């Protein structure tokens, strides 16, 4: 019986290439729901089983991880809530045609063969495809094809040796995506809402608020750039002196280096130099010679490809990976995203060399490699890395240059090919000579190297070695130097980081993966955090330096690589099965939330750092949307949370995060010393949860019968809070036409206006709103005591309350006109 098999590749070009190889070019083509992802059909036999193959593709990830709708707007919640806000993975609208294609094709098939890239990211995409296909056909038999090059040998081997997909790889990517989403969104919202409108950023476009992005990999990468820049700025140049000796004879020239190197004491250097000048006779007291070797490079992995392309061609890592991906999809090189730098023992290396014999430039060298009489061949070295997914990068097809190639395509293909030929070659061999001489008790040395066999250096034009010789010296030989000089120099700071340097640091610290490093570097440039000059060296912008300085001032090394490196190790542990996805999410997010809350509590240090680089706007700090502890959902706009905030003047309020679009606010008593939101929910107020607030009042600014500590509610049910607002007033701004004193006005609309409308006409058991001539009775029907407020804001104001303190009656007597 013929089995119908749905085959899915990661890109349309890969689907077409694999289908052409498996069908021998005889496949039929039809359209899918997406105009970019066609369906190829042909017959094929897998391990003796006749199959009808339908071959289509996706375009990278099918699904996106995002917060639930309630949390997507920046003003919808406190950024700290994003560490536990619900998230979901779904198909975005532009991928819905792809989803329909997969579901329709899966209904007609009994096998699903996954041809996604064979790394963790590809495995995660594979499970997205599985989820969509199984939604329409849960009985699908799932298979995984593992390949490293789009060539017949690899593709036929992959389809005849199908395996199962690895859920641990997919879990590791899920963990990284969720961690990056929560950390990135929380810090990005925090930074942007705090600083975006407060400073004049000259590179903000069209007067739009600049997004101050934070990425868990992006920021440590920026940290490397800023740290090197600070090293350069901190450098204090110092003068030094050194003695240089040179000797020239008929046999050649020798430059001798002073064993002391250099001295920073000018007087001492002059004294030693004068001694040498007075007794300039040099005596050779030691001559050594030995064979030395320069080893060829390890097989090529992604990190080395990016570093060497940057160093040799000044090509950006982003461009290198783009070109390498295109060469891979066209079948000229193997998969370019790999950590592996050692070939397996059974890998047929000579087949690859044989393909290059025809090349007009390095073809003759390839031919000599295959000739056993030359002894040029050597098994490649082991670099010590193996991702268990792909071999090192190598050429898979001969090309003398294609008509549609750019200069960059030619250079990357040349680098990959020459590197491969070099790594299967013998080391270069040379003979090194070192001579030591004595002048007035000071020791000098000269070295030379003569290459006796270039070997791999013949084909690897990007490296050079030796080539300098010195005259023949014998022990006891004496001579007068041709020149003996005391030269002054100045210490120099280290150079700015090059792209190759930056990739090396990221690799050593475990920041990002071989496949994502170039993306993190590009984001630094796109976000205006760093610039790159024509020599591919990086400098931080003022904005990048200010952000790193701000976190450095806080004491949290969020710009250092340690936290992210630890997370990357945890992700590796998930893919290895030694940790679970849930464990890594819990530990990483708990740690980063603590960092976030601490950074938020020190937000003024961000302003201090920014003020060193940028001018302030006219907008006051009190208007900044800096978040706070959530009290309730805003009932005015129903689009954001109400949060507890403390203004720079020390006053407290509960305001909507959607300000200035929503100005709903509740101003709290002036006598407040401290306030924090508790975990208790009021059982009387709504709609939704209204969290009670722990208040601590200033002793002496509230009447003595009130406790200094009180847990209350701003939902309208708290009588004590209402009374203290009447007595002490609030921190709201004065509004034209409002009465002096308490300043209740419209700013307490939620607590006062609404509750007043609900009360209707005043009665004897409600708070009066006008002067009464009759005795004021409390809820106990007793005559109230008339008291006088002594607080600063309400000094002299009269109010009534129960004389026996048996009920909660309170009435504030209106101020008499002036």
Image (tube, grey):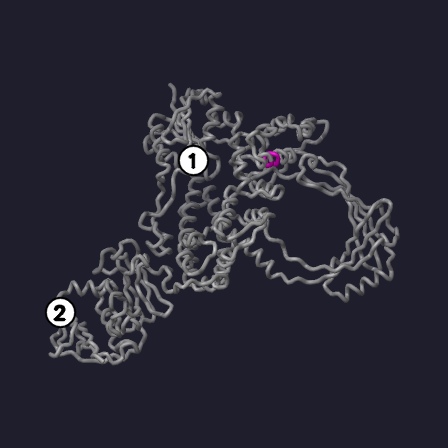
Of residue 218 and residue 2, the one placed in the foreground of this image is 218
Look at mark 1 in the image and give the residue it sits on: 59
Upstream in sequence: badge 1 or badge 2: 1
Q: Is residue 688 left or right of residue 101?
A: left
On residue 484, the disc is none
Q: Main secondary structure of the magenta part?
A: helix
**Vertical placement of 709 versus 117: above or below?**
below
Residue 638 in the image: x percent, y percent? 26, 54
Q: Is residue 404 visible?
A: yes
Q: Is residue 598 visible?
A: no
Q: Is residue 723 left or right of residue 128?
A: left
Q: Residue furthest front?
A: 206
Residue 649 picture quarter:
bottom left
Q: Which residues are magenta?
A: 411-416
Residue 258 in the image: x percent, y percent? 77, 56
Of residue 649 and residue 597, the one placed in the foreground of this image is 649
> The C terminus lies in which quarter of the figure?
bottom left
Residue 747 picture quarter:
bottom left
What secondary structure is found at the residue carrying circle 2?
loop
Look at mark 2 in the image and give the residue it sits on: 762
What secondary structure is found at the residue carrying circle 1?
loop
Residue 814 in the image: x percent, y percent? 20, 76
Of residue 427 and residue 266, the one placed in the foreground of this image is 266
| Residue lying at 53% horizontally and 27% vertically, measured from the top left | 151
Q: Is residue 501 left or right of residue 602?
A: right
**Vertical placement of 209 versus 428: above or below?**
below
């Amino acid at each position: 019986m013929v089995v119908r098999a749905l085959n899915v590749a990661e890109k349309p070009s890969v689907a077409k290439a694999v289908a052409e190889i498996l069908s021998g070019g005889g496949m039929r083509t039809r359209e899918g729901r997406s105009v970019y992802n066609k369906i190829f059909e042909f017959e094929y036999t897998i391990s003796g089983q006749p199959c009808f193959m339908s071959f289509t593709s996706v375009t990278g990830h099918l699904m996106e991880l995002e917060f639930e709708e309630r949390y997507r707007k920046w003003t919808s919640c406190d950024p700290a809530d994003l560490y536990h806000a619900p998230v979901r993975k779904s198909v975005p609208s532009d991928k819905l045609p792809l989803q329909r294609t997969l579901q329709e094709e899966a209904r007609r098939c009994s096998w699903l063969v996954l041809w996604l890239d064979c790394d963790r990211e590809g495995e995660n995409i594979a499970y997205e495809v599985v989820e969509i296909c199984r939604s329409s056909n849960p009985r699908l038999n799932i298979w995984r094809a593992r390949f490293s090059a789009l060539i017949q040998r690899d593709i036929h081997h992959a389809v005849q040796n199908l395996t199962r997909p690895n859920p641990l790889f997919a879990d590791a990517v899920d963990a990284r995506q969720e961690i990056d989403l929560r950390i990135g969104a929380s810090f990005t919202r925090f930074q942007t809402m705090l600083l975006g409108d407060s400073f004049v950023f000259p590179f903000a476009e069209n007067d739009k608020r600049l997004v101050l992005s934070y990425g868990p990999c992006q920021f440590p990468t920026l940290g490397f750039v800023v740290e090197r820049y600070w090293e350069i700025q901190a450098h204090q140049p110092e003068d030094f002196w050194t003695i240089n000796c040179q000797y020239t004879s008929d046999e050649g020239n020798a430059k001798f280096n002073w064993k002391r190197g250099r001295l920073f004491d000018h007087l001492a250097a002059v004294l030693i130099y004068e001694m040498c000048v007075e007794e300039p006779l040099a005596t050779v007291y030691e001559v050594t010679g030995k064979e030395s070797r320069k080893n060829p490079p390890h097989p090529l992995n992604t990190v080395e490809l990016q570093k060497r392309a940057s160093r040799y061609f000044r090509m950006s890592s982003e461009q290198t990976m783009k070109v390498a991906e295109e060469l891979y999809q066209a079948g000229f090189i193997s998969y370019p995203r790999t950590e592996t730098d050692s070939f397996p023992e059974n890998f047929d290396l000579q087949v690859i060399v044989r393909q290059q014999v025809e090349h007009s430039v390095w073809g003759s060298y390839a031919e000599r490699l295959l000739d056993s009489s030359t002894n040029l061949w050597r098994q490649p070295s082991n670099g010590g890395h193996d991702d268990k997914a792909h071999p090192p990068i190598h050429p898979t097809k001969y090309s003398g240059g294609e008509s549609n190639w750019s200069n960059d395509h030619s250079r990357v293909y040349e680098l990959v090919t020459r590197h491969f030929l070099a790594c299967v070659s013998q080391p270069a061999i040379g003979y090194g000579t070192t001579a030591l001489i004595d002048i007035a008790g000071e020791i000098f040395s000269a070295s030379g190297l003569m290459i006796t066999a270039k070997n791999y250096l013949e084909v690897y034009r990007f490296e050079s070695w030796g080539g300098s010789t010195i005259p023949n010296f014998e022990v006891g030989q004496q001579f007068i130097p041709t020149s003996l000089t005391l030269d002054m120099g100045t210490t120099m700071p280290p150079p700015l980081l090059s792209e190759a340097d930056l990739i090396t640091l990221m690799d050593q610290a475990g920041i990002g993966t071989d496949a994502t490093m170039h993306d993190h570097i590009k984001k630094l440039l796109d976000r205006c955090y760093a610039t790159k000059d024509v020599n591919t060296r990086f400098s931080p912008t003022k904005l990048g330096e200010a952000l790193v300085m701000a976190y450095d001032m806080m004491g949290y090394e969020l710009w250092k690589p340690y936290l992210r490196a630890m997370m990357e190790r945890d992700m590796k542990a998930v893919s290895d099965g030694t940790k679970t996805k849930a464990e890594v999410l819990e530990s990483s997010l708990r740690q980063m939330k603590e960092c976030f809350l601490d950074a938020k509590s020190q937000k003024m240090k961000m302003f201090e750092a920014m003020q060193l680089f940028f001018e302030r706007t006219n907008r006051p700090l009190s208007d900044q949307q800096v978040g706070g502890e959530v009290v309730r959902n805003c009932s005015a706009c129903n689009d954001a949370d109400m949060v507890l905030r403390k203004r720079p003047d020390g006053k407290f309020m509960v305001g909507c995060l959607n300000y200035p679009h929503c100005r709903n606010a509740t101003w709290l008593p002036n006598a407040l010393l401290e306030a924090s939101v508790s975990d208790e929910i009021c059982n009387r107020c709504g709609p939704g949860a209204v969290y009670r607030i722990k208040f601590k009042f200033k002793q002496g600014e509230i009447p003595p019968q009130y406790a200094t500590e009180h847990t209350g509610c701003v939902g309208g049910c708290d009588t004590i809070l209402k009374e203290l607002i009447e007595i002490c007033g609030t921190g709201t701004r004065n509004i034209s036409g409002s009465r002096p004193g308490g300043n209740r006005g419209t700013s307490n609309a939620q607590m006062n206006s609404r509750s007043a409308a609900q009360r209707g006409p005043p009665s004897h058991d409600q708070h009066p709103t006008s002067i009464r001539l009759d005795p004021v009775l409390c809820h106990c029907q007793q005559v109230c005591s008339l008291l006088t407020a002594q607080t600063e804001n309400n000094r002299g104001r009269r109010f009534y309350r129960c004389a026996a303190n048996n009920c909660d009656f309170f009435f504030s007597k209106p101020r008499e006109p002036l």
